[in-house]
Image (cartoon, coloured by chain):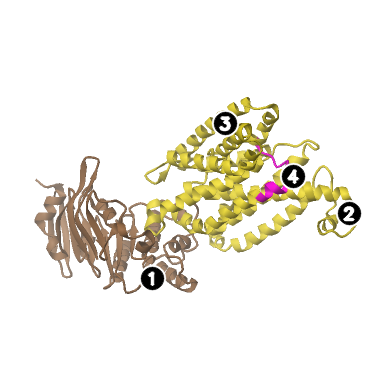
Chain colours: A brown, B yellow
């Protein structure tokens, strides 16, 4: 389990994150939404250990994050950053296999990579040069790399996937494809923490929605309760209408600012 | 490129053995070539002590050509491998120990050892040459890395300009030292600034190979980490790389290799820049294969350059740095032009 206890983070004199408390569970897809600059990515970086909290602490599996070494942690949690650059002409296959830990047998390695290529609709791409792919294709390759990082190693230990806007460059078909794939990965040993901008995708795929506004968590609830007209309109500054549909919720809004 | 990339992955399986064969042939050619021509067919006799080769040829091969050939191989391999590691560390194909001032840092340390060290400590100072050259290279690499990297990102323009600045400062200090020195030491300035393999001895060969062995121990630690570093420091960290240790190991390896090469042959430019770049055009950039392939190709190119240097104006000899600059300068320009957009960001 991931726990954030009273986590604050300041950049210079600006308080980016203020006293956040959060618990991430396995078998759950936690979606974080919020306007630009709300602190979503900073929260993710605090949870992954990229940033150190100014006060408070992040714990994973009963230990403070500082007590984990990089290698140990890599087998238990994987991270997709918002933008990742790559130098040198690696092929898609090579980029994905960078995610696999050392010591995976060649045969397992091949099977995992084949599976990832299939899951992220990258069949036939393995020998293409990464740098020559489109932005959306590159994003899917990074997803494949990040997911395969958790595909080997101890099966009975809890693992977490942190994705910062994983579908920002994708077309609608692949947005659905990727988020469905992430849902399928959920298990009693695996949980996911995903930042999304598209509220309807959040409504369609989240188990739990965390709404971040001005460095604070204003709502942390199961999807059906989190998405309500009042909170959403206040946070996003636009009149929002959350509509129940047969299978879940839809968010609609008018193209003018809230009065 | 798409199709080419498809076969790229397995090319190291052919490329590395092919490079080994070429290196063997080049080494034989290097032993046979020079002011005195030695017939290739008489080489086995000289080397293995049978046959009726002349005593003169024997002396030339054993005490001149062979050490020189070995030294060229070791220095070429060191320079190219350190270029490959440095480019991986800086995440930048334009990094080169010569261009970014690492070599000139080693040169300064080496010249200081000779000029100052001999005054105070006598001959013993000369024996410490590889060590001081290593320290000089180490300090300049750390300095440059600190200057060019902010928030885990290396800026190409800062790296190249910082390298020029460090190069200018170290060269100026080297100049001051040379000015203070005796006439004999003065003559050695060309050796340090343009490089030469003349005066190769078995002792020098042995000392370089010792340093290469140290660096070799780091290779396997470095290879996978440098691959992951290509995605950025944060990503490498997410994938389990201890980035601080990786960077330190890479800096030490670069300084070991460059320092060893400089201490026996002066500053020979462009091998470290050109070789890894050419290889990445035809093979996978994975460092596990790139670094050994670079070592092989670097050895081959330096052997070729040395053969040109000692035959083209025979019986005189051209500083080898001039030959490598003639090859490397245009390639560097071409790389700049094809990378313009990346460099300006």
Which tag is nearer the camera, tag 4 or tag 3?
Answer: 3
Alpha carbon separation for disc pair 2 and 4: 23 Å
In-front residue for pair B3/B97: B97
Which type of secondary structure does the marked residue at label 2 adopt? loop
In-front residue for pair B65/A185: B65
Q: Which residue is mark 2?
A: B53
Is B201 magenta? The answer is yes
Q: Which residue is mark 1?
A: A153
Residue B72 visible at all: no
Percent position (x, y) of residue A37? Answer: 23, 47
For the residues beneath circles 1 and 2, the answer to whether they share a chain is: no
Q: In the figure, B168 relative to B82: above or below?
A: above
Alpha carbon separation for disc pair 1 and 2: 64 Å
Q: Which residue shows up at 16% across the image and 57% down it?
A: A252
Alpha carbon separation for disc pair 2 and 3: 46 Å
The answer to whether the residues at label 2 and label 3 have Cβ atoms under 8 Å apart is: no
First in sequence, mark 4 or 3: give its number: 3
Pointer 3 chain: B
Q: In the figure, B195 relative to A190: above or below?
A: above
Percent position (x, y) of residue A101? Answer: 42, 65
Q: Which residue is mark 3?
A: B171
Alpha carbon separation for disc pair 1 and 4: 53 Å
Residue at the extreme top of the image, as rendered: B179
Percent position (x, y) of residue A157? Answer: 31, 71
Pointer 4 chain: B
Which type of secondary structure does the marked residue at label 3 adopt? helix
Range of residues picked out in magenta: B194-206
Residue at the extreme front of the image, as rendered: B121
Q: Which residue is mark 4?
A: B307
Quarter of the image where the N terminus of chain B is located: bottom right
First in sequence, mark 2 or 3: give its number: 2
Quarter of the image where the C terminus of chain B is located: top left
């Amino acid at each position: 389990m991931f726990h954030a206890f009273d986590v604050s983070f300041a950049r210079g004199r600006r308080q980016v994150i203020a006293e956040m408390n959060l618990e991430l569970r396995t078998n759950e897809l936690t979606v974080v939404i919020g306007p630009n600059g709300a602190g979503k990515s900073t929260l993710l970086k605090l949870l992954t250990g990229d940033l150190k909290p100014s006060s408070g602490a992040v714990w994973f599996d009963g230990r403070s994050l500082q007590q984990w070494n990089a290698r140990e942690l890599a087998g238990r949690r994987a991270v997709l950053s918002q933008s990742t650059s790559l130098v040198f002409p690696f092929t898609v296959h090579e980029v994905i296999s960078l995610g696999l830990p050392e010591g995976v047998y060649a045969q397992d390695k091949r099977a995992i990579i084949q599976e990832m290529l299939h899951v992220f609709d990258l069949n036939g791409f393995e020998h293409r040069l990464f740098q020559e792919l489109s932005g959306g294709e590159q994003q899917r390759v990074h997803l494949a790399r990040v997911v395969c990082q958790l595909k080997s190693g101890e099966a009975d230990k809890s693992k977490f996937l942190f994705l910062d806007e994983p579908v920002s460059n994708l077309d609608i078909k692949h947005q659905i494809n990727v988020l469905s794939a992430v849902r399928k990965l959920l298990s009693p040993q695996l949980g996911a923490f995903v930042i999304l901008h598209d509220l309807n995708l959040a409504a369609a795929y989240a188990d739990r929605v965390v709404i971040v506004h001005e460095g604070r968590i204003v709502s942390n609830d199961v999807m059906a309760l989190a998405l309500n007209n009042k909170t959403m309109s206040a946070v996003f500054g636009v009149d929002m209408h959350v509509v129940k549909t047969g299978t879940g919720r839809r968010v609609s809004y008018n193209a003018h600012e809230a009065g | 490129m798409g199709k080419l990339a498809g076969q790229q992955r397995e090319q190291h399986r052919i490329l590395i053995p092919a490079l080994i064969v070429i290196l063997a042939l080049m080494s034989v050619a290097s032993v046979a070539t020079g002011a005195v021509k030695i017939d290739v067919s008489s080489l086995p006799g000289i080397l293995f002590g049978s046959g009726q080769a002349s005593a003169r040829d024997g002396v030339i091969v054993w005490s001149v050509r062979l050490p020189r050939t070995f030294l060229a191989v070791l220095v070429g391999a060191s320079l190219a491998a350190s270029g490959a590691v440095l480019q991986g560390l800086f995440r930048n194909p334009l990094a080169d120990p010569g261009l970014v001032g690492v070599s000139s840092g080693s040169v300064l340390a080496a010249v200081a050892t000779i000029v100052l060290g001999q005054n105070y400590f006598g001959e013993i100072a000369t024996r410490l040459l590889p060590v001081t050259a290593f320290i000089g290279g180490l300090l300049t690499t750390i300095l440059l890395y600190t200057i060019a990297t902010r928030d885990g990102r290396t800026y190409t323009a800062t790296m190249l300009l910082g390298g020029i600045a460090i190069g200018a400062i170290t060269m100026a200090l080297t100049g001051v030292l040379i000015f203070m020195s005796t006439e004999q030491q003065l003559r050695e300035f060309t050796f340090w600034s343009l490089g030469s393999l003349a005066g190769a001895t078995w002792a020098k060969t042995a000392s370089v190979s010792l340093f290469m062995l140290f660096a070799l121990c780091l290779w396997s630690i470095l290879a996978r980490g440098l691959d992951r570093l290509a995605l950025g420091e944060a990503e490498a960290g997410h994938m389990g790389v201890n980035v601080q240790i990786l960077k330190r190991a890479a800096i030490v390896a670069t300084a070991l290799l460059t320092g060893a090469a400089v201490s026996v042959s002066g500053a020979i430019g462009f091998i470290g820049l050109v070789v890894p770049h050419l290889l990445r055009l035809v093979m996978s950039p994975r460092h596990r294969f790139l670094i050994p392939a670079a070592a092989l190709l670097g050895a081959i190119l330096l052997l070729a350059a040395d053969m040109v240097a000692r035959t083209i104006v025979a019986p005189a000899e051209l500083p080898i740095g001039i030959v490598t600059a003639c090859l490397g300068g245009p390639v560097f320009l071409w790389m700049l032009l094809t990378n313009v957009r990346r460099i300006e960001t």
